[in-house]
Amino acid sequence: MGRFLLGLALATAAIAAPGTAAAQTGSCGSVAGLVCTDVSVPLDRSGAVPGTISLHVESYTPPGGAPRGAIFLIAGGPGQGSAQTFDLTEPTSRELFSFLFPGYTLVTYDDRGTGQSGLIDCPALQAAVTPTGEDKLAAACAASLGPDASLYGTADHIEDLDAVRAALGFDQVALFGVSYGTKLALSYASAHPDNVNLLVLDSVLPPSLPDPFSANVLRAMPAALATWCSGVCGAATPNYAADVTAVANRLAAKPVVGPVLEPNGKSASDRLDGVGVLSMVIDSDLNPALAAELPAAMHAARAGNVKPLLRLHVLDEKASATTAVDLSAGLFAATVCRDGPFPWPSDAAPAVRAGLLSQALAALPRGSFGPFGTYAAELGNADLCVDWPAPSGGASLGDSPYPNVPMIALSGGFDLRTPTANAQSIVAQFPQGHLLVVPGIGHSVLTADTSFCADNAVRNWILDPSRQPPTSCPRPSFIIPPLAAYPAATTPRRLGPAATFTLASKTLREAEASWLLLDGAPPMHEVAGLYSGRIVPVGTKGFKLVSYSIAPGVTLSGSATITGDVLPFQFDGALTVRGASAAAGVLGLVRNSLKGTLGGKRVG
């Protein structure tokens, strides 16, 4: 969600909450019930480093008051500012969270180092698109922070959260966390148990995690891929998990370099290795279009045609690019490198850490990374933080006793970065804990579940936390279903109408997914075809194809626009089929039904 605060004015006043101390507050634009506050906290609570940080806070009390108290909305990363991410200035966001948490005042604030709370922006690290070399970029970021580099750990975020709670005058609060936000919520509940009365955890990261090598993520990946693909990927591959394993391990041993077409018609070289393959797979749990494309591209790569996978790699890098305001890579590094855990003492000099890291990897038992080699450890934070200045690590909080309060945890069955086992381990520690799993959904359940089953379950539970919520939801409909197998890299010299129609249909479905893969990633990107042409976005609801091709000798031109509000997305449009190998003609598209005339014959 983008955040645009218009007419922000701060004035000395007090929020109308019992026992509130004076704070710098004011209205946030013209939104009734929305108040902005600046809460000043010490940069270093030990006093060794002088200075303060001003935390930007937003709170929204819906019409009719807030008899249930306040719920803090805590974003993930680390690196996402919660005020930026949840954007209470935006009507749709206010309506969603007011629906989820009826009767509550909604509170968001930007953690130190994010958003409007002393944003950390390290441009070189922010622009990095692969794990390779990020350790040096992170070290350079730390050098720019100087003595402040060790003051952004979860322990600091815990006390900032408590300072915001106290400044707003709430004795107890409910907490809603997403991803890293669940780690912060749980850590806060452990450190300040008397100040928490309810927890909602979406995509759970226990305080003892992440694993320094992401080993738990890698062990869980094959089963998650197999479950997600069961019954829906047959036209692309007989075994998606096996394809991923084979391609990742092969490219770890020998990376592939090849040309990828650009929208301007030129080609650029792309390099893909085993870690890049696994990173792309993990990214797919936040990008339904990437998830739809990967099984077919991975199977083609396993069979020797890496062209579709290289192209997806380039598209994924574009889709994954973020600004520091949206997710600060510098704050991410500052938090995870302070937290650990790592296979070195927190005061170990960077010069000795590489050796300790190698020793720790060598000591791991066989199978620690599932079917993947030790190369996959590069996905973990240990590799990122190996050159971070001391202290690095040693502040990991571990799983501690939690208050006996109502708690619900949500997990997506296709969540590749915070597997369901994470949520299970935490729910077991809460006598009033509940787990809800949504099959087929990736990371961040409440904003990804298109069926709204999880949203309704949370709302009903909030209205009566003593009730038993459902333990699972039906699998929601796809936004874009998994694609069928890519056509062969070579096309017969001349195709008949039926074969041309089959290839045109595949081209259209692939174009829909490729457009959606980058849709909403500003600026709106044009997308090059696999062999020729491009996709030109038209607003947010459709696109034009210009001689677009995913097989030599067959091109599509025309337009497609989303119609209606059902899933999978339904498209209307008109397309012209041309090319040296094609039976030329025109096709009409009505709610995904393609028909027309090719080579003088009716098809479809």
Image (cartoon, rainbow, N blue to C red):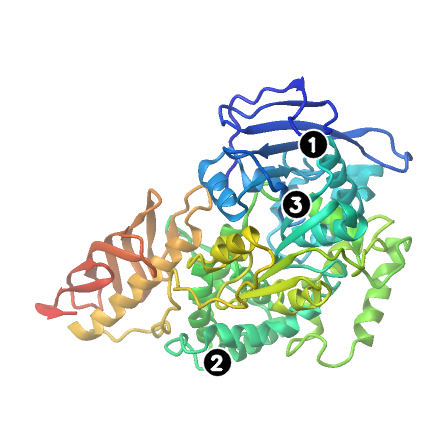
Mark 2 vs mark 1: give the one in front.
1
Mark 3 vs mark 2: give the one in front.
3
Disc 2 target residue: 239
Q: In this view, does 435 lie above or below 65?
A: below
Cα–Cα gap, marks 1 and 3: 23 Å
Mark 1 vs mark 3: give the one in front.
1
Residue 585 at x, y = what percent?
Answer: 14, 62
Q: Does residue 234 appear to the left or right of 106 in the view shown?
A: left
Q: Residue 269 carries which label?
A: none
Mark 2 or mark 3, which is nearer the start of the sequence? 3
Residue 485 at x, y = what percent?
Answer: 37, 74
Disc 3 target residue: 79
Q: Does residue 414 appear to the left or right of 184 in the view shown?
A: left
Q: Quadrant of the C terminus?
A: bottom left
Taking the image as drawn, is residue 324 in sight? no
In what element is the residue under mark 3?
loop
Q: Does residue 373 appear to the left or right of 267 in the view shown?
A: right
Q: Which amino acid does label 2 sit on?
A: Asn
Q: Residues within 10 Å of mark 1 (few under 14, many from 20)?
A: many
- Residue at the left extreme of this rendering: 600
Q: Is residue 188 above or below residue 418?
A: above
Q: Residues within 10 Å of mark 3 (few under 14, many from 20)?
A: many
Mark 1 or mark 2, which is nearer the start of the sequence? 1
Q: Which amino acid does label 1 sit on?
A: Leu
Cα–Cα gap, marks 2 and 1: 53 Å
Q: Quadrant of residue 300?
A: bottom left
| Residue sitting at x 71%, y 64% | 431
Residue 10 at x, y = what percent?
Answer: 63, 20
Q: Is residue 164 above or below residue 503?
A: above
Disc 1 target residue: 168
Q: How crowded is mark 2: few (under 14 residues within 10 Å), some or many (20 or more)?
A: some
